[in-house]
Amino acid sequence: MKVPYLIAALFGTSSTASKLYAASYAGIVTTLEFSKSNAGHELTTISNSTACGPNPSWLMLDAKDNWLFCLDEGLNGPNGTLTSFEVGANGSLSKIHSLETVLGPVQSQIYHAGDRKFFAVAHYTGSSVTSYAIESSGVFTHLQTFTYKLDAPGAVPDRQEAPHPHGVILDPTGQFILVPDLGADLVRIFHINPSTGLLEPRKPLKVSPGAGPRHGTFWTPKGARPGSVTDTRFYLVTELNVHLTGYTVHYGNGTIALTKFYETTTFGGSQPPSGSSAAEIAISPANNHIVISNRGDNTFGAQNDSLSVFSTADHSGKYFANVTYSGQIPAYGSFPRQFEIAPNDSAIALALQRNHRVGVAGWDDRTGHGGPLLAQKDLEGEIVCVVWGS
Ligand SMILES: *[C@@H]1O[C@H](CO)[C@@H](O)[C@H](O)[C@H]1NC(C)=O
Ligand SMILES: *[C@@H]1O[C@H](CO)[C@@H](O)[C@H](O)[C@H]1NC(C)=O
Ligand SMILES: *[C@@H]1O[C@H](CO)[C@@H](O)[C@H](O)[C@H]1NC(C)=O
Ligand SMILES: *[C@@H]1O[C@H](CO)[C@@H](O)[C@H](O)[C@H]1NC(C)=O
């Protein structure tokens, strides 16, 4: 959770600031500060670390324990690396622990079993899913590796020559982990053993051939208690056919079932611009919009890609309303591989891979309208992930 804090009121003007952590394929994790004052918005770098490994691809903040987990994709092989950092009050990152892992970790997710904490990782190049137990000190131990194979290449053979787990999503009840697999056109489903935390494979969900599942997110009514939720939706973004697919979610006794109720392109039914691919997906903090990033669509001019906005609930975020396409808003750069909307603020942080840049754009959480570019910062290497800190 982002908690804005007051920094020194110098010269009679006060300002607020939030931290951001950005991962660069050049081997650097940078801590930035996004500040707002009477003079405007600014992004400044405050520290950096090279301890994640050669190709940081994903960052996972555990705000409760003040840990940042970094995944190193290991683009040149033979392995990836997972590293936990202690986040200092000044945003400095001190390495706690790291483990060599299967090649190509690209997304991770924390989950719980009893009072113990775990995380699961999707490995794109290594065609695998792995799981780990986290100790109270931020040290973690490897538990499981599931490695997959394809009998034959998929409908898009150059990208689907092998299984490519790309995302990890925890369901709202905390009982299941879903893993979109871009190469296999599946969403792999695991039940979390409530006493051991081990992942138990279940029958996967099949998607259309050539869709290329990448990331996903759940929607539940705002304020509802997870145990009492009656309306749960799952939204999947598929990279290769550039689609958004919605599923209704039904729970049984230790089971989860997904039924498709909606599908369109991330351009609201229009043909996506040739060469474009969908990347990230999130539900807005107000719980009423779905936001998706597109790469290489140049919707707002050369080197200016877009985010797609769909509405999915009434203004209160409490009642599902049919998914409707609201339009595209600018990403203010090229290849927004990942983004995160600040939970308590009117801002979207964007990882602009091809610009080697972090952008922060305005966002009106009530209406789902985009705002102006507030600040940007060029860094070294391709920026592939940016998350808000405290
Ligand atoms: C990282 O931080 C050090 C120390 O503040 C600084 O000298 C260096 O230029 C920074 N490197 C990058 C790539 O930002
Ligand atoms: C940030 O805090 C750490 C301890 O948490 C300290 O070692 C480091 O020197 C501090 N860096 C700066 C720039 O103040
Ligand atoms: C590192 O990569 C090698 C070669 O692919 C693999 O055999 C090994 O299991 C990997 N190490 C770990 C810890 O996964
Ligand atoms: C739920 O399933 C478990 C084992 O699969 C069984 O032991 C339990 O009795 C079932 N509960 C209900 C309410 O059906």
Image: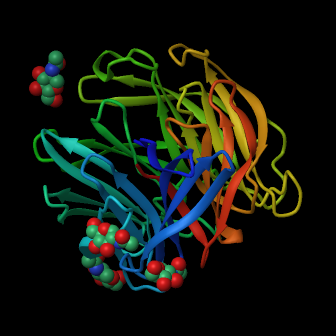
Image quarter (top left, top right, bottom left or bottom right) of the N terminus = top left
Q: Along the horizontal axis of the image, is 142 left or right of 345?
A: left
Q: Is residue 176 above or below residue 313?
A: below
- Is any atom of residue 81 visible in this view? yes
Asked where in the image residue 320 lies, by quadrant, the reply is: top right
Residue 205: percent from left, percent from top: 46, 41
At 74% across and 40% down in the image, what residue appears?
Answer: 371
- Ligand 4 shows up in the quarter that is top left
Residue 125: percent from left, percent from top: 47, 72
- How many dots with numbers? 0
Q: Along the horizontal axis of the image, is 243 left or right of 90?
A: right
At 24% across and 29% down in the image, what residue appears?
Answer: 254
Residue at the extreme front of the image, as rendered:
11
- Is any atom of residue 27 visible in this view? no
Q: Along the horizontal axis of the image, is 140 left or right of 184?
A: left
Q: Along the horizontal axis of the image, is 236 left or right of 96?
A: right
Asked where in the image residue 190 lies, by quadrant, the reply is: top left
Q: Nearer the viewer, residue 359 or 234?
A: 359
Q: Is residue 184 above or below residue 286?
A: below
At 53% across and 13% down in the image, what residue appears?
Answer: 319
Residue 64: percent from left, percent from top: 27, 46
